[in-house]
Image (spheres, grey):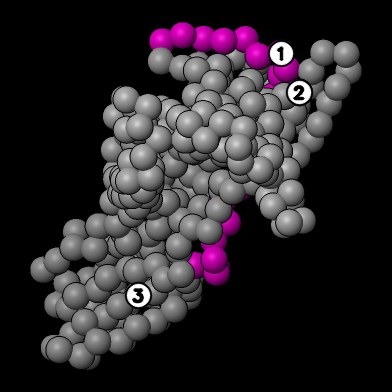
């Protein structure tokens, strides 16, 4: 058994399987992460046993840097399991202007040792989105900048005047049109068509391009360009025990650390521009991983000195 566990063939086979799992997770997986699967944990345990068995079998006849490298790798893998078993992770929903210390996972709620208040939430685009009106008539296609006051004269006659443009179309209880948020979630443009004594005001939606098909003697579509979201950012105030406080931003790739916890930007609500969802984590086994990396680094430095 010791000979099997210390085999180099087993080591390379395990590395190949783990590499394949990482590639699958990164490029193809759209479901639950493989890192929590029992088979992935089994591969990690087997790799740790393989490295430990290799070091044990060679004993103290090898240089110190070899033993440190092997021990460091085993500790790093063990640290990954400790981190997973002792990791705290919960969802923290926040509304603008309100402070909360309650985080949730499943049906359970947890009271955090600090309060978080959402000061602001914003969505950033790679470039300023542009609203365009596309006129398609008799095989001829023309594109216009959909700004209020624009007058389009179709070849079939009449005029089409742009009255209003909204980024996020919404209705009040009395069917009044409002801008629900400053973000391009449900962009629309209102235009008045006048021809042969007929006047009609119509709304054209980017998300529903065919809703007026056949109603006019031409096809008219509203489209938005450059509306690709770059990031969404929450500005929060954190207040803990003993007067500890911090104000900062939480973005998709920029977490915020406070009091041993890490806050990540997770989601938002298109129906509520003043809402954000953060993920709060605490890795209480991270020090084991750091200790493993320290052993590996020490082994590498000793190796280089040779």
Work out whether mark 3 precedes mark 1 in sequence or the reverse, and give the earlier one. Answer: 1
The residue pinned by badge 2 equals 259
- Single out the mark in the foreground, 2 or 1: 2
Q: Which residue is mark 1?
A: 113
- Residue in the image at 49% along x and 58% along y: 229
User: Residue sitting at 32 percent across and 25 percent down?
Assistant: 1
Q: Which residues are magenta?
A: 107-129
Contact (CB < 8 A) between labels 3 and 1? no
Q: Is residue 202 above or below residue 47?
A: below
- Image side of residue 207 versus residue 156, left or right: right
Q: Is residue 97 visible?
A: no
Specify few, some or many for label 1: CA neighbours under 10 Å numbering under 14, 14-19, or 20 or more. Answer: few
SS assignment at label 2 = loop
Judge by depth and name the residue closer to the eye, 56 or 220.
56
Total labels drawn: 3
Q: Secondary structure under badge 1?
A: strand
Which quadrant of the figure contains the C terminus? bottom right
* Residue marked by disc 3: 133
Crowdedness near tag 2: few (<14), some (14–19) or many (≥20) residues, C-alpha within 10 Å: some
């Amino acid at each position: 058994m010791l000979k099997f566990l210390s085999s180099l063939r087993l080591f390379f086979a395990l590395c190949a399987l783990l590499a394949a799992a990482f590639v699958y997770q990164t490029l193809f997986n759209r479901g639950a992460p493989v890192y929590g699967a029992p088979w992935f944990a089994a591969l990690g345990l087997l790799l740790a046993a393989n490295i430990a068995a290799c070091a044990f079998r060679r004993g103290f006849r090898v240089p110190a840097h070899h033993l440190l490298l092997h021990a460091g790798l085993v500790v790093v893998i063990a640290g990954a399991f400790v981190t997973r078993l002792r990791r705290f992770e919960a969802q923290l929903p926040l509304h603008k202007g309100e402070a909360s210390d309650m985080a949730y996972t499943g049906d359970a709620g947890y009271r955090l040792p600090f309060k978080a208040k959402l000061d602001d939430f914003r969505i950033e685009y790679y470039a300023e989105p542009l609203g365009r009106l596309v006129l398609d008539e008799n095989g001829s296609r023309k594109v216009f900048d959909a700004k209020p006051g624009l007058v389009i004269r179709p070849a079939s006659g009449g005029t089409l005047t742009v009255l209003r443009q909204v980024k996020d179309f919404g209705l009040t209880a009395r069917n009044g049109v409002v801008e629900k948020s400053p973000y391009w979630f449900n962009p629309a443009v209102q235009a008045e068509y006048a021809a042969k004594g007929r006047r009609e005001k119509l709304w054209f939606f980017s998300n529903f391009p065919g809703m007026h098909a056949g109603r006019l003697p031409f096809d008219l579509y509203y489209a938005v360009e450059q509306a690709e979201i770059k990031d969404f950012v929450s500005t929060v105030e954190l207040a803990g025990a003993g007067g500890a406080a911090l104000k900062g931003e939480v973005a998709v790739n920029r977490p915020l650390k406070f009091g041993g916890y890490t806050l990540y930007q997770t989601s938002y609500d298109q129906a509520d521009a003043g809402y954000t969802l953060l993920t709060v984590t605490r890795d209480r086994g991270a020090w084991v991983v750091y200790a493993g990396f320290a052993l590996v680094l020490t082994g590498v430095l000793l190796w280089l000195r040779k």
